[in-house]
Image (cartoon, rainbow, N blue to C red):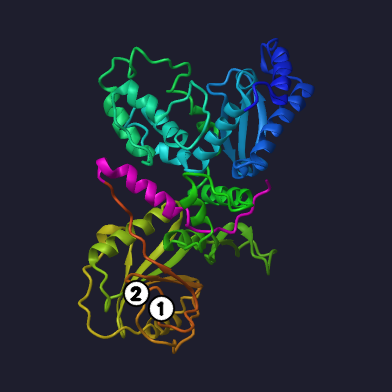
Amino acid sequence: MSNFTYYDKEKANLYREAAEFNSQKDIDAQFKIKFFSLIEKCNLHMITGKDSFFGNFMLNVKKQTSLGLKWPIETTRSAKGYIMNFDVKICLELTEWEMQALIKHEIYHIMYSHYDRAQALEGRYRKSAINIAMDISVNQYIKYPPNFTYTIEKVNFLYNLSLKKGRSFEEYALKLNEAMKDYRLGKPEVSDEIYDMELVHDSWKKSNVLNKEYNEELVKIMAKRAIKDGNLPEGLEAILEALEMKAEISWSNYLKRLVMTMPHGYKKTITRKDRRQPERLDLRGNLRDRVANILLVIDISGSITTGEIRNILKEVFEILKNCKANIKIAECDDKVRRVYDIKDLKDIKSRLDKTGATAFSPLFSYVKKENLKDTLVVYFTDGLGEKELKVKPVNYKTIWVLTGKEKEISLEKPYGKVLSLKNKREYDDDKVGIHIARDMIHDIQGEVSVLTFDL
């Protein structure tokens, strides 16, 4: 590393200008151009070096200037992508290597979904424990971090811990939170902390509230744009490789999407005139009826239990909590044995004993006979049945959810989406970090939605 580079010279000139700034309005357009030109030089060195992933990632990040931030770079997200706010005074005090380290630090947070995972721990642990844990979980992969950042070695020294590298931030947060109970202010008196670790990630709360699928899709799109030469950063290999795998849609996410688009029929209203005879004021008009009709089909010849049915219905009711829905349960083997309405979990009936083999056609004969054209059918089965349906489905759409080990359904033409049942995971406190980190890598392979982004 050179003692004094072109970057350092430009930085020194800008720092003299920034020293005169007292508020945000003092940062004029000309200064912004020069400042971002400096950041682009830093970025170019990453692109042409071993950190090309981070440099390419930054090409799709919106950049803004600020003063008085709680951290040198604060990241927020919107529906269109990520925004990095640079505190010009603080950033111009850093070397180029430190600037690169902080940029990589922010991108690691994004890739590890720390924005969302931290929310799961809020209220359980100290904010400073959560924030420091997130930082040390990513700083272990970064060279030349500024002295004010936390590393595993620094935390082990300050809190007399023996944290190991390669663990999840949830595990670090658990152990840090316990260690902080031994200190009056949650930190040792020898701490050289210059940033309030309770506040350093508060900018995340300014981010737009987006659903999980949208957030994951945003990360996927930006990450795929950043992978140009196959040079994967340390600590992100598993996540980035997962992005290249075929995504598997969860049945609950797919159901949620279909419910929002399925037809709901019409209802009579006095607020609209009849379209065919508008002069007849005594005739009521029509409005879209926002009631979804859903038929949950349980293959009772399979191994699914009443407890599993209850868990499935919990997910269904959670998905439908903000919309009206008529839900029926049908129990089938080689015949439709029973159909009943259900409004909440207490309406669940004990599963009938299995009798015949599995046949899918009887259910669709029933759907046709009852004229359930506006109904979404969700069929839970082990997948072992007929090869061909004897009755072509007339219902709105069908989701096949495989409950066993089979990855494919026996039908050659299922007339619907075939997905796998995924059970929710629960974790013990002492293992929560490892499991959530593994699941986060697995879940990032989740639904590839139809959303597009203008980045």
| Residue interval drawn in magenta | 428-455
Amino acid under disc 1: Ile
Q: Residues within 10 Å of mark 2 (few under 14, many from 20)?
A: many
- The spot of residue 355 in percent (x, y) is 22, 83
Q: Which residue is mark 1?
A: 409
Q: Nearer the viewer, mark 2 or mark 1?
A: 1
Q: Secondary structure at mark 1?
A: loop
Q: Residue furthest toward the front?
A: 2
Indicate the quadrant where residue 266 lies: bottom right
Q: Residue furthest toward the bottom?
A: 390
| Mark closer to the chain start, 2 or 1 | 2
Q: Is residue 225 left or right of residue 291?
A: right
Q: Is residue 296 left or right of residue 116?
A: left
Q: Which mark is residue 381?
A: 2
Q: Is residue 246 above or below residue 178?
A: below
**Marks 2 and 1: CB-CB under 8 Å?**
yes
Residue pictured at 42% horizontal, 15% vertical? 192
Query: Of 37 and 20, which appears nearest the observer?
Result: 37
- The spot of residue 364 in percent (x, y) is 42, 82
Amino acid under disc 2: Thr
Query: Of 200 and 267, which appears nearest the observer?
Result: 200
Query: Of 83 and 393, which appears nearest the observer?
Result: 83
Q: Is residue 119 left or right of residue 220?
A: left
Q: Is residue 69 above or below residue 20?
A: below
Residue pictured at 25% horizontal, 20% vertical? 182
Indicate the quadrant where residue 244 lies: bottom right
- Quadrant location, the N terminus: top right
Cα–Cα span, label 2 and label 1: 9 Å
Q: Residues within 10 Å of mark 1 (few under 14, many from 20)?
A: many
Residue pictured at 20% horizontal, 77% vertical? 353
- The spot of residue 235 in percent (x, y) is 46, 44
